[in-house]
Structure formats: C-alpha cells, structure tokens
Image (cartoon, rainbow, N blue to C red):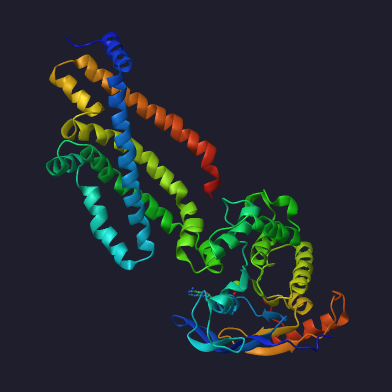
Amino acid sequence: MEEVKGKEVLRIEGLHKRFGALVVLDDVSFDICQGEFICALGPSGCGKTTILRIIAQLAYLDEGRIFIHGNELITDGYLNDLSVVFQEPRLLYWRTVEENVKLALELKRGRVSDRDEAVVSKALSMVGLSDFGDAFPHELSGGMKQRAALARALVTEPSILLMDEPLTGLDLRTREDLQDEILRIWKERDMTAIFVTHDPLEAIYMADRIIVLSDRPTKVKEVLKVSLNRPRNRDDKRIKELEKYIRELFGYKKLE
Amino acid sequence: MFPGPIETVYAFFSILATQDGWYQIGVTCYRVFIGTLFGSCVGALCGILPRYSKMAEYAVRSVVYPLFESIPALCWVLVFVVWFGLSDVTPILAISTAVIPFFIINIWEGVKELDETLIEMAHTCTRNRLRILRKVIMPMLYPYAFSAFKTSFEVAWKVVILGEVFGAACGIGYMLWISYEVYAIEYVFAWTLCCAIIIIVFDYGLFNYIDRRYMRRWKR
Ligand SMILES: Nc1ncnc2c1ncn2[C@@H]1O[C@H](COP(=O)(O)OP(=O)(O)O)[C@@H](O)[C@H]1O
Ligand SMILES: [Mg+2]
C-alpha cells in the first residue's frame, strides 16, 4: 500500500470558471502530492479539460488560487516541468513521428543538438515506437498516434504529466495496453500524474486517488483513495465494488 | 506588311543568338523575382499580423488591402516613374504592389484555417511566440503561400512588361516598346513569344513540379 505520501506538488483552491453565462467550475479544490497518480473523474462537459487547461496555464481562472510547491507564483520553471497529453494526438501532420517528438525540444530550447537524437530515440522506445520514427502520423493507428503524443510529452523529462482522456476513442485492447504502459512509465520516471477520464473503471485501475467531479456547475463530489496494491488485477472484486460505489454516486447515470 | 511566323521565329532566334537578348530576358526575370519576393514579404506580413493585433486587422482590412486592391497597376507605374524615374525600382515596385493583395488574401485565408489545437499544444512546450510561429504556424501556411506565389507569378509577368514599357531603360518590356517604335513588328512578336514561353515553362513545369514533389506533406 502507498502509505508514504510525498510532498505536495500542486494545490488548487476554490477554482471558479465561467464561459459567458455558463458556469462551468463552481468551487473545485484538490491537491496532488509528489509521485502521486491522480484521476479526475466526471461526466462529459463537466469541465475536466478546463481544469487541465487552467493548470497548464492555457486558460485563465475567474476565481481561485493555484499553489505550486506551496507557492502561489506560476514560474517558467513550473511550466517547463510540465507536459500535456491531449485527448487528440495533436501531431504535426507534416512531420514524421521522430520529428514530432523532437518538436517538443525545439520549442522548449530553440535548437536541438546531436545529443538530443539519443533522447528522442529513448522516448520513442519507451512508448514502443522505435520502428516507426520515420512514419507520418496519417500512417499510424489511433493507439500509435497517442503513443507518439506520449513520447513527445515525455521527451522533455517533465516531473508533472497532465493527461486529458488520452485513451478515449481507442478500442478496449489498445486502451488496456496503454493504461499499463502509462503506469509503467509513470513509475519509472517517478512523475506526478493527473489523468482525466470519464470511465470509472479506468480511474480505479490507474489512480492513487480519484477526484470525483459532479455535473455542471462542477464541484468536487468526493475524493476517493484507491488503496489497492500495484500491479492491479482488472478482475479484482474490489475494483468492481468501487465501480458500483462510484456509479451510485452518480445515480447510475451513464458518464459519457 | 504584317510579319508571318517565319519572320517571327527568325527574329526570336536572332534574339537568343545575341548576348544582349539574354541580358534583356535576365533583367526582366530578375525584376520579377525581386518584385515578387518583396511583395510576398509585405503581403504575408499583412496577412499574418491580424492574428496578433486587432489594430493590425483593422488597418489591413480597411486601409492596406483596399489600397493595393483598387489602384490599377498602370497608375502605380506612372506614380513610380515620377518618384524614381527610369530605373529598376519602378518595375520592381510595380510588381510588388500588384502581388501584395494575393498574398494578403491567401495568407489571411490560411490564418483563418489554422489548426488551433496544434498551436495550443505548442503553447504547453514554450511561451516563445516566435518559435511557435516558425515551427508550427508557418508550416501550416506553406500551401497558402505556394498558391499565392503561383498566382503572383503570372500577374508579375503581366505587370513587369507594363512597368518596363513606361518605367525602365532595359528589359523585355522596354525591347517590346522599342521594337514597336521602330515598327519592327516581327520583334514585337518575338519578344511576346519569349514571355509566353517563360511563363509556360515556369507555371506548368516548375510550379507543377514543386507542387507534386514537395508540397504534399504540408497539405492536410
Ligand atoms: N473556450 C470555451 N468557450 C466557451 N465554452 C467553453 C469553452 N471551453 C469549454 N467550454 C464549455 O465548458 C464546458 C466544459 O468543457 P470541458 O472542460 O471541455 O468539459 P469536459 O472536458 O469535462 O468534457 C462545456 O459545456 C463546454 O461547452
Ligand atoms: Mg474534455
């Protein structure tokens, strides 16, 4: 059991966000500790993407505070330390997989050196795409595109990884493979991860803690600690029980 | 008498046989190249700046674009002759003013079609807007720039002749005019043939080749 809780990396307090008259986030607060795997679980349209965009400084919050390592200042250091995997792969269609991965370094540093070739190929092998470096995105399957996006996020060696439903839309088999690979990489790299999903099973399988979000206007319904040993077994009865519990929280509503 | 095809072809080859003939062709090509290049830079800038500033959008939409779009090429040529006299500058600027609207329109269109999700992704890697412009935004605009170049090239050739008739002391347009003045109509036809061949070679040959060979990867 993961009883040793690391230091707090990120804390969000009283997040409010409106789009015009539409109140999306209505007081969302939670925290994330060093090395933790957090899942944000909520129905479609409840503002999960919006939360991640605010954390990654792609959107502004209307009210609320964000603390990074206990400090309210958003520094370039924090943003350099953070990578995002989006729901869509968002690969540049004119670049090969390898060039797409390299893009993250080019953007971050301005130029890349020969030494970075090794870093890029390490990232590619980490996601199992070593043989596809020269392929163009349109030649890849959905799962492989998302692997490439993951490699691009990892190549800058972030310590915080934000993932916005990266596996939604993939077939079950690919999904489960990638769930395991993401967990493996998260452990290996000792990252702090925030993983957004609308699938309770996925959240239970992956998370140390689940932030259960309500319908719009969104609040935190409950923070669920998942104290199952890793690696977890998908057929574990306790996973099924937790799923039932979560579905009851939502009144058995379909989450998609 | 009206010259026939034989006289025209004979005149055409006698142009190609002299160093001066090639010089005149070279001068005109050089003006087309520089004029289009300069116009493309100004036009592309006017097409892309509105993305970054509301002021720029207003300026381009209501002043810059209408200015270049509405004034006929001949008027520009006459204005430039007054300002710069008979020199390279007159035909070059005449070309630039003529191609600028094509670049504004095409690049602006491309800017509207930009895939914002890719730009947002880039923003998670850097806050340096210039890098995002160079690595992500500009490549998305290449196909639009290419089609602007294609249209501009044809327009540039029409304008350069006009510019050289009125505003230059050498070049194909100037030679056309001189031939006409001395009533050497077979040379008028021969120089026209030169223009036509150059345009066909570039348009059907070079641009089609670039399009097939290199442009595919930049297209969605
Ligand atoms: N830029 C925006 N402008 C207007 N409305 C938005 C914008 N982004 C998101 N929304 C709205 O906010 C709500 C939450 O969106 P989102 O965060 O994408 O939800 P989720 O990721 O949970 O499905 C949706 O109703 C969406 O329409
Ligand atoms: Mg979403």
Above or below, B70 against A199 in this view is above
Number of numbered labels in the structure image: 0
Query: Which quarter of the figure has residue B151?
Result: top left
A56 horizontally vs B91: left or right? right
Image point 70% across, 81% down: which residue?
A: A38
A18 horizontally vs A44: left or right? left
Q: Position of residue A158 (x, y in %)?
A: 65, 71
The quadrant of the rendering that contains the N terminus of chain B is top left
Image point 36% across, 60% down: which residue?
A: B49
Q: Position of residue B97 (x, y in %)?
A: 25, 45
Image point 45% across, 52% down: which residue?
A: B141
Image point 51% across, 42% down: which residue?
A: B215
Of residues B153 and A250, the one nearer the viewer is: B153
Q: Position of residue B207 (x, y in %)?
A: 44, 35
Above or below, A74 against B173 in this view is below
Above or below, B97 against A110 in this view is above
Above or below, B50 against A56 in this view is above
A72 horizontally vs A236: left or right? left
Q: Position of residue B30 (x, y in %)?
A: 32, 34
